[in-house]
Image (cartoon, rainbow, N blue to C red):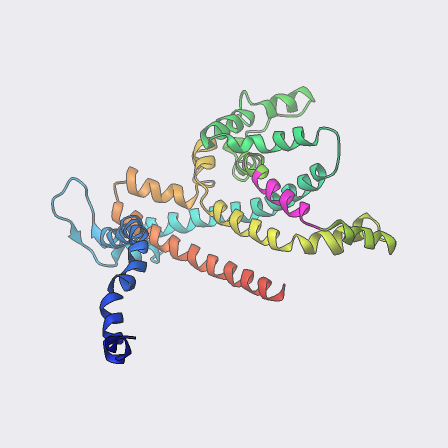
Amino acid sequence: MSLTAQNPEFTARKRRGGGGFHRVEPYLYLLPHAILFFVFVVYPVVYGVYVSMHRFDLLQQTQTFVGFEYYRNLFDSSTPQSQFFWQTLLNTTFFTIVSVPLLVATSLGLALLVHRPIFGRSFFRAVFFLPGILTVSVMGILWRWMFDNQIGLVNAVMTAVGREPVPWLATQGLAWVPIVVGTVWWTIGFNMTLYLAALGNISQSLYEAAEIDGATTWPKFRFITLPMLAPITLFVGVTTALASFQLFGQSQVITNGGPTRTTQSVIQYITEEGFSNNQLGSATAMGFVFGVMMLLLTAVQFRIMARDAREA
């Protein structure tokens, strides 16, 4: 053994000198992601804060600084921005409250039906999933025609059975019907697929043990299926709620936000404020306020998910 190898100071100095690359190596692996994260997340957020504090005009060389004026406008009931922003947010919340339970319940029901060994099971699974591959424009045009006041299929059927036609798209309240029904029809297949995967993971021994104890269909569903599906139900509920708060295309194509903005979503109004009214700073401020609300909602949902994981 050499004298230099026996010297602790030499060994430590060698490690410090020779380990330089090893200390940097992990950061090199993270560098590509860090660059993409900065370009597509950090920079847009920082630039968005800058835009929201200026009277921003793309055609002007200099932008007028307005501070938190656009944020204050959202909480000043005398401004149109406050009136329309909170009204459209209320519309979006109403859509979420109505559509999420329907999407969860119907997708679970369909999954239970096509999970059973029935004839043509694969065909029915494909039929229920197929609407999900359509674009929102195609789905919107289809359901707008279905509920059209003059030539719609729904009113044609009602007339054929002796009922008066209903102006679905021009009546407050009823205008939500084609939006909600179309959204459920359009997105039910994805949730159904998630439930089918979860149903396949439930051990049949649980049902066999319950049958030995004399359990019928409802007790088996109530005390075995539902508890075993609780994690996937929470996931479906969370993702469906977040997607519902992003309502845009359905109401844009089917009702164009009418009548009198009663079906206009908050994303629609932010887009209108930014690109139709040319108020990019105001629209960006609305986007940040709405984004903070979604972050709070997501935090609550993650807290529920963490508690559920601990209890499991």
Tell me the residue at 55%/29% (across/down): 167
| Res. 264 image quadrant | top left
Is 201 on the left-hand or right-hand side of 79? right
Left/right of residue 230 with respect to residue 187 in the rendered view:
right
Above or below for 96 versus 14: above
Q: Nearer the viewer, residue 1 or 58?
A: 1
Q: Taking 76 as reference, is 276 above or below it? A: above
The secondary structure that most of the magenta stretch takes on is: helix
**The magenta stretch spans which residues?**
190-202
Which quadrant is the N terminus positioned in?
bottom left
For this orientation, the residue located farthest to the front is: 1
Front residue of 128 and 144: 128
| Residue 194 or residue 200, whichever sits in front | 200
9 left or right of 192 in image: left
Which residue does the image show at 52% across and 35% down from the upper left?
171
Q: Is residue 258 visible?
A: no
**Residue at x 79%, y 50% (from the top left corner):** 218
